[in-house]
Image: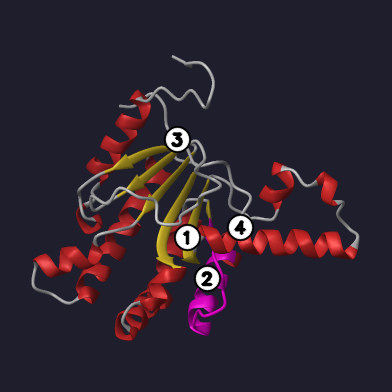
């Protein structure tokens, strides 16, 4: 077993549609299978493997450009299934957060998000951060706007803006990402947690997300444990 577990792991959930196409099924079939896998990996990573923060890229700001039928199905999936995750995370003393813009999301999706966050707000064992209607460019833009508004109001001296000030204005104040996993074989980060991934270790796997089992996650952890994380300095090994 790996000796070193990432404090903050992030997963770009990718490959649901291809998984469905390989089986001659519609995209909705793959998204449902992917969501079931998401619940399993969430339980395993935070509940069993000791990852303190797990960020999941489940819907980007750009995904709204997809076919309206597919987008509506995904919104149904989120609204109808988030609550079951919330109850389980609450039993495991894990807090549920969401990162992204609420604008554009259906009210019932926002209601499910609020229910999850309210139910788990006092939990401390771990954090599951769903990145929904999320884009790193949008996050940084929103942070800059908030900082500019404070400077204009006279509550923030522009000369005092540093990395800590920027981080305080991000959607969530979470530890930097240690391990970024992307399934499906694509080797890019697609506008995901750009600030937080500054020194992340990247792990790309050809496995499509509905097939990304607990054993696959363990392989990613084992690879992470082998990495020499210098963080811009000398070797720590």
Q: Secondary structure at mark 1?
A: strand
The residue carrying mark 2 is: 113
Q: Closer to the N terminus: mark 3 or mark 1?
A: 3
Which residue position is annotated with label 1?
A: 130
Q: Quadrant of residue 211?
A: bottom left
Q: Nearer the viewer, residue 25 or 18?
A: 18
- Nearer the observer, disc 3 or disc 4? 4
- Residue 6 has which mark? 3
| Residue that badge 4 annotates | 140
Residue density around tag 4, few if under 14, some if 14–19, many if 20 or more, within 10 Å: some
Label located before the other in sequence (3 or 2): 3
What is the residue that sits farthest to the right in this orientation? Answer: 154
- Mark 2 → mark 4, Cα distance in angstroms: 22 Å
The location of residue 177, given as percent across then percent down, is 49, 42
The structure residue drawn at horizontal position 23% and vertical position 53%, both measured from the top left corner, is 184
Give, as a single range, the part of the protein colored magenta. Answer: 96-117
Distance from label 1 to label 4 (Cα)? 17 Å
In percent of width and height, residue 132 lies at: 47, 66
- Which quadrant of the rendered structure holds the N terminus? top left
Q: In front: mark 3 or mark 2?
A: 3
Is residue 156 visible in this depiction of the protein?
yes
Q: Are marks 1 and 2 in contact (CB under 8 Å)?
A: yes
Counting from the top left corner in percent of width and height, residue 103 is at: 57, 78
Q: Secondary structure at mark 2?
A: helix
Secondary element type, mark 4: helix
Specify which label sits upstream in the sequence, 1 or 4: 1
Label whose residue precedes the other's in the sequence (3 or 4): 3
How far apart are the two marked residues, 3 and 1, measured between alpha carbons? Answer: 18 Å
Give the side of residue 15 with respect to residue 163, left or right. Answer: left
Earlier-in-chain disc, 1 versus 2: 2
Label 3 element class: loop
């Amino acid at each position: 077993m790996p000796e070193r577990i990432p404090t903050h792991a992030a997963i770009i959930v990718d490959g649901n549609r291809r998984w469905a196409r390989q089986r001659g099924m519609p995209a909705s079939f793959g998204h449902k299978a992917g969501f079931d896998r998401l619940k399993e990996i969430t339980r395993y990573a935070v509940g069993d493997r000791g990852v303190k923060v797990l960020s999941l890229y489940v819907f980007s700001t750009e995904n709204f450009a997809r076919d309206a039928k597919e987008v509506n199905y995904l919104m149904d999936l989120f609204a109808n299934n988030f609550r079951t995750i919330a109850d389980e995370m609450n039993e495991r003393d894990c807090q549920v957060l969401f990162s992204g813009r609420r604008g554009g999301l259906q009210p019932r999706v926002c209601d499910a998000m609020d229910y999850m966050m309210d139910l788990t707000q006092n939990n401390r064992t771990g954090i599951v951060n769903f990145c929904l209607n999320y884009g790193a460019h949008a996050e940084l833009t929103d942070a800059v706007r908030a900082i500019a508004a404070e400077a204009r109001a006279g509550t923030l001296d522009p000369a005092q803006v540093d990395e800590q000030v920027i981080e305080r204005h991000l959607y969530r104040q979470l530890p930097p990402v240690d391990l970024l996993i992307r399934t499906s074989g694509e080797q890019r980060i697609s506008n995901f947690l750009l600030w937080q991934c500054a020194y992340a270790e990247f792990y790309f796997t050809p496995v499509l997300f509905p097939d990304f089992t607990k054993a696959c996650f363990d392989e990613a952890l084992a690879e992470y444990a082998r990495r020499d994380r210098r963080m811009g300095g000398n070797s720590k090994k």
